[in-house]
């Protein structure tokens, strides 16, 4: 097996492979299984023509990548963003494989994306784009094959359009085709808050492990969307003083602590934007990462903690709400500084865990209340945290490598049992 090297720390697929290589090496992974898991099972690129409101036609590019479906149907969100690319979607698909294995839900890993700027699309254009994308990937998805969900810039309404498009082709309602749907349409209680709620649970467990009292801790959150906003609330509810929160345009900093009621009301009204929020001093958007606080939750996007700024991070605990926020080169710097990092494939796994609950409820036709969902989520995530830390402690690695080792081992075990169909 080649010694892991990373040429470009900001290429998410290389960043994913680097950690996979380290885990594979430490596990003594079977070379055949290594070769299988290194490359996605299937990737498709689709062309998505959309009739625009002004009568013109625009053609968008979309992707769906299934990294592994050996443990169950592919699972993973669809993101709409101007800078989505195949390597990013590949990495995100693989991260879903490891994430589902880390929390031990019976799914593989997949991801989708469409290159577009949703801010520039009208509601009608967004709906037509969503429906045509769904129609284009329909051959490879299905409740038992691959189940999409929300991700960056996609939400329950978009899931409803996806479900409807699929259902129209099937000639019957098929709720289990996507998760993250509105409640009225077979969505699950607790799904919208699940990722941030899970970040809260993982913060609590990390604090216990590090022997820190939440009531004397401060926290900062990068990202004010669904994950960032709910994470801020979850940490606040544990007694952590939230000093700052950021979005793409600004950081809002308040050394007395952000007024959570006012923040929540603002984010509800302004759909995840901090523009005009008066609850503190306005700093530049990147400032949030290096503020003096005990806990940092990067809950925005990839590659925000890199070799360039890792040395300036003051936090003692980082809980990754985003996928891929830390590069492998930054991992080393943080490890040397003794920062405890709850890796993305565990830190943000609350979302896919409740997606799993949604899919189960759809198949049962029997729905649970929010308390039931949250209790089950807590049980799964706390168990995963302990298993990840157990692996890391036994192997003398970071929690990230511990999480990869646990996940790769679980996926490899299924490959071994199933064998190769030849
Ligand atoms: N997009 C979320 C993630 O990255 C959720 C995926 C899902 O629920 O399938 O984990």
Image (cartoon, rainbow, N blue to C red):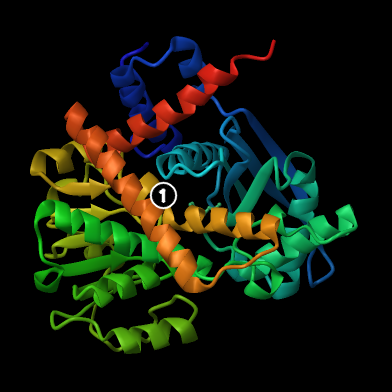
| Ligand 1 is within 8 Å of the C-beta of the residue at disc 1 | yes
Instruction: Return the x and y of residue 153 as percentages of the image width and height.
Output: 55, 63
Q: Residue at x 22, y 65 (%)?
A: 287
The residue sitting at 74% across, 60% down in the picture is 163
Foreground pick, 138 / 13: 138
Front residue of 81 and 328: 328
Tell me, yes or no, if residue 231 can be seen here. Answer: yes
**Which residue is located at x 13 percent, y 54 percent?**
316
10 Å crowding of disc 1: few (<14), some (14-19), many (20+): many
| Residue 313 seen in the figure | no
The residue that label 1 is drawn on is 323
Tell me residue 150's x, y (percent).
Answer: 57, 59
In terms of secondary structure, where does tag 1 sit?
loop
| Residue 86 percent location from the top left of the image | 57, 38
Q: Is residue 170 left or right of residue 85?
A: right
Front in this rendered view, residue 88 or 318:
318
Query: What is the quadrant of residue 197 in the picture?
Result: bottom left
User: Image quarter for residue 21?
Assistant: top left
Question: Where does residue 393 sit, x and y in percent of width and height?
Answer: 18, 34
With 4 as the anchor, is 374 left or right in this view?
right
Relative height, residue 367 to residue 328 (above, below):
below
- Taking the image as shown, residue 81 lies to the left or right of residue 248, namely right
**Farthest residue in the right direction?**
171
Say which quadrant the C terminus sits in. Answer: top right
241 w.r.t. 353: above or below: below
């Amino acid at each position: 097996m080649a010694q892991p090297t990373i040429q470009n720390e900001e290429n998410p697929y290389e960043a994913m492979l680097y950690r996979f290589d380290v885990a594979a090496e430490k596990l003594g992974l079977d070379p055949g299984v290594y070769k299988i898991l290194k490359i996605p099972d299937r990737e498709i690129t689709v062309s998505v023509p959309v009739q625009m409101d002004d009568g013109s036609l625009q053609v968008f590019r979309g992707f769906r990548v299934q990294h592994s479906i050996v443990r169950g149907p592919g699972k993973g969100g669809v993101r709409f963003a101007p800078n989505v690319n195949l390597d990013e979607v590949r990495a995100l698909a693989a991260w879903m494989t490891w994430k589902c294995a880390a929390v031990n839900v019976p799914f593989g890993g997949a991801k989708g994306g469409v290159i577009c700027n949703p801010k520039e699309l009208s509601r009608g254009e967004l709906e037509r784009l969503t429906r045509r994308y769904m129609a284009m990937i329909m051959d490879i998805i299905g409740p038992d094959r691959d189940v999409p969900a929300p991700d960056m810039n996609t939400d329950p309404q978009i899931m409803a359009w996806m479900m409807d498009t699929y259902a129209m082709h099937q000639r019957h309602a098929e709720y289990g085709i996507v998760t993250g749907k509105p409640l009225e349409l077979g969505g699950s209680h607790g799904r919208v808050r699940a990722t941030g709620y899970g970040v809260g649970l993982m913060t609590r467990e990390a604090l216990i492990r590090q022997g820190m009292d939440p009531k004397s801790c401060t926290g900062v959150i990068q990202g004010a969307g669904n994950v960032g906003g709910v994470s801020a609330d979850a940490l606040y509810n544990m007694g952590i003083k939230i000093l700052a929160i950021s979005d793409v345009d600004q950081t809002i900093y308040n050394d007395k602590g952000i007024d959570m009621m006012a923040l929540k009301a603002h984010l509800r009204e302004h759909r995840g934007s901090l523009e005009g929020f008066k609850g503190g001093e306005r700093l530049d958007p990147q400032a949030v990462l290096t503020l003096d606080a005990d806990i940092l939750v990067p809950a925005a996007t990839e590659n925000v903690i890199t070799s360039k700024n890792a040395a300036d991070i003051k936090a003692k605990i980082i809980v990754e709400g985003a996928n891929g926020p830390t590069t492998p080169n930054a991992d080393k710097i943080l490890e040397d500084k003794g920062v405890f990092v709850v890796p993305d494939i565990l830190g943000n796994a609350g979302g896919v865990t409740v997606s799993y609950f949604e899919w189960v409820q759809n198949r049962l036709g029997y729905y649970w209340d929010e308390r039931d969902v949250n209790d089950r989520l807590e049980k799964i995530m706390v168990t995963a945290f302990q298993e990840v830390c157990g692996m890391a402690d036994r192997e003398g690695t970071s929690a990230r490598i511990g999480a990869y080792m646990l996940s790769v081992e679980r996926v490899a075990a299924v490959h071994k049992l199933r064998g190769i169909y030849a």
